[in-house]
Image (cartoon, rainbow, N blue to C red):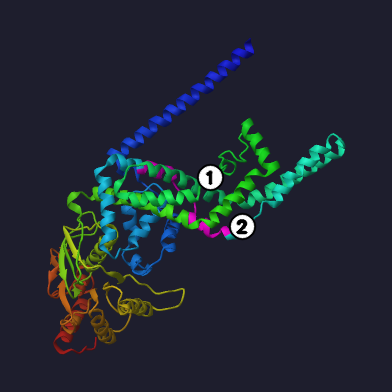
Amino acid sequence: MEYVLMIIVSILIVAAILILEGYRAVKEEKKFTRRLYEDYESLFQKDYSLERFAKLGSYYSRHRKPGQIDDITWNDLGMDEIFKRMDYTFSASGEEYLYHTLRSPRQNRQELEHLEEVVAFFGDHPDERVKVQLQMRKLGHTGKFSLYDYIENLDYLGERSNKKHYLMDFLYLPLIGMLWVYFSAAIIGIVVLTIYNIVSYFKEKNEIDPYIVSFAYVMRLQAVCGQLEKIDIPVCADEIECIRRHRNRLQSMRRNSFWVMAENRGNASGDILSIFMDYIRMVFHVDLIKFNSMLQVLRGHIEDVDALIGTAGFLETAVSIWLFRQSVGEEGWCRPEFTDRPEIAICGGYHPLLKDPVKNSVTAERGVLLTGSNASGKSTFLKTVALNAILAQSTNTCMASSYRASFFYIYSSMALRDDMGSGESYYIVEIRALKRILDAASAGEKPVLCFVDEVLRGTNTVERIAASTQILKSLGSAGILCFAATHDIELTELLKKDFDNYHFEEEVRDGDVFFNYCLMTGKASTRNAIRLLELMGYDEKIIERATAQAEHFLESGDWQEA
């Protein structure tokens, strides 16, 4: 009786624990769901490690096409930080598709109009938005590597056949039949066969274990996409049909997949059932057999997996864009307007990473040449215009009061460095970067919008001005809209037929320099380099001599000896 009572009490304790754990899980899920409606910002505090960024480009790398943002432009504009600012995703698929979106400006209105339909739908239908987010949270991530890293390494597994496993399992039948005739020999045979199967099992299990992560993600991807199908999103009829079609092609991968995907597989948890199932796997290789059949299906349906990743990622990216818009407020963004001629007009444009940005406006139908002193705002303005152009064509969202422009291929040459690996100087790196812009324009596929900061800063003054003039003239030709910043005031006269002049200026007062960061028409009329030396406490003789030399050059065009 005492034993029966102990068993009953134990069962009640276990049941109570399970009920409490279930209640806690439901409560946490409700709390999380409520925050998706009311306090979503607090849910997206991510740790963006180098390891994480290394895998973000996997989907993008697999879907290369003309007009994407190249590495030079991406790094010049600090687009990694822009990605972080816009990332409101829960899954690897969402992250990678958002990254791909920012690097792939669209080149036609139809794609942007459809994206806008989906973004607007999630804004108007919070219940459907939250349902998508909850499913993408279940999908989650793949760990250290992208799913594509695993997929691309499937070939390392070689051709795997189940014939050997089936043969070893089949051998148990005659051995069992021999038990009634040659009992001892049969027992020895069964023991030897079992030992062989167990030893060979662990050898093969170690080979496939790294790929279980990718298989598990594909299984979750199929399950999540199955739930996405059930969400009523009328504007995504094509996407839902795409999910349905590609999921059906992968159904055979799901059957009996629990043998491979079981969470307690081989973890020695102590659970009697788990231990029994582990021995079944070791002796009969059922999980190895299923893995090989799953591998064969996956190898033949990589494009189906890719389509599911892209479609689910697109939905979560649309949600992310809507959340980003919410984070900047109604007055902080606008939808772009696209025209058929190469022009750009921004009113109240700003950089989203600045805490208290000064908004500027510009209209350009030909090149823009920016002058002004150091730290006056030239580079930030170039990045603001470039960033708005990219966001307009990739997310249909601009950081401005209004934005009107053509569809462009977008390039920059701004934050280059010496290439220590190849031994190339800054000058060589820069002229290569400029040449790629001219080559893109020569291809003539789309108008080119380019941004150049301090052209040819890596060479001497005379040759810099001469070469810069001719390069910028080329960048100001038909089919190219160029924004360039320079300290060489001479270029404003040499290029006045090809570029409109704008500038930023500063004010020196009370022994300090103040910048208003407001874009102004015309060329810069102030110089502050020598004045800054004075403010920093340099010797008066240095200031006087430098001033005298500068004035002499401006008057005569010749440099006098120091």
User: Looking at numbered disc 1 in the image, what kind of residue is underneath it?
Assistant: Arg
N-terminal label among 2 and 1? 2
Q: Which residue is mark 2?
A: 157
Residue 258 drawn at (x, y percent):
57, 41
Judge whether 433 appears above or below 78 on screen.
Answer: below
Residue 134 belongs to the span the image colors magenta:
yes
| Left or right of 462 in this view: 209 | right
User: Looking at numbered disc 2 in the image, what kind of residue is underneath it?
Assistant: Leu
364, 81: nearer the viewer: 364
Rendered residue at 23%/74% (across/down): 481
Instruction: For mark 1, give the secondary structure.
Output: helix
Rendered residue at 42%/31% (across/down): 25
Q: Indicate the quadrant containing the C terminus: top left, top right, bottom left or bottom right.
A: bottom left
Instruction: For mark 2, give the secondary structure.
Output: helix
Rendered residue at 81%/37% (across/down): 177
Q: Which residues are magenta?
A: 132-154
**How far is mark 2 from mark 1, CA to CA?**
20 Å
Q: Indicate the quadrant containing the N terminus: top left, top right, bottom left or bottom right.
A: top right
For disc 1, the neighbor class at 10 Å (few under 14, some 14 to 19, many from 20) is some
Q: Note whether residue 142 is visible.
A: no
Viewer-nearest of discs 2 and 1: 1
Residue 182 belongs to the span the image colors magenta:
no
| Quarter residue 296 falls in | bottom right
How many numbered badges does the structure rendering display?
2
| Left or right of 33 in this view: 398 | left
Q: Which residue is mark 1?
A: 254
